[in-house]
Image (spheres, rainbow, N blue to C red):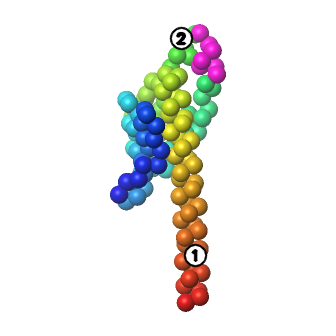
Amino acid sequence: MTNQIANNLFGYIEEDFSTRKLTLSMGKFYYQTCITNFLILSAQIQKIDLDEMATNISDAFDFKTIKCIGFNKKFQLNLAEIVHLKELIEEAHFNLALSELLYKENIERCNNLVKNF
């Protein structure tokens, strides 16, 4: 069973509960991985300086190469794609944290019910 945890006009991130894998799809960028590798990818994306990409006129700043762990393919993303990818990742982080918080709260509530039964 999958659940979409983030989306915008350019792509989505979904979680597969049976495999505990995340799928990130955004145009040419498609990556399926475990949560740990997703967190490493998101840290890599968050380090990209958008202001420098936007203001530097050198061709070297037109694209960033994204290397995904456990995946042999590299992706060349432009500024707009990186902005949309950052939005997806931020929304996914929020929803994953919220899901974990609700899960812990439900476990605690169930444990209290069992103790009081």
The residue drawn where x is 47% and y is 49% is 5
- Which is more toward the observer, 97 or 22? 97
- Which is more toward the observer, 83 or 40? 83
The residue drawn where x is 59% and y is 74% is 108
For residue 73, which numbered disc appears in the image? none
Q: Amino acid at mark 1?
A: Arg
- Dot 2 or dot 1: first in sequence order is 2
Q: Amino acid at mark 2?
A: Asp
Q: Quadrant of residue 114?
A: bottom right
The location of residue 16, given as percent across then percent down, is: 39, 54
Asked if 61 appears above or below 36 in the picture, the reply is above
Residue 82 is at least partly visible in this image = yes
The secondary structure type at the circle numbered 2 is helix
For residue 59, which numbered disc appears in the image? 2
Q: Which residues are magenta?
A: 51-57
The location of residue 24, given as percent across then percent down, is: 42, 41
- Which is more toward the observer, 9 or 13? 9
Asked if 37 appears above or below 18 in the picture, the reply is above
CB atoms at circles 2 and 1 under 8 Å apart?
Answer: no
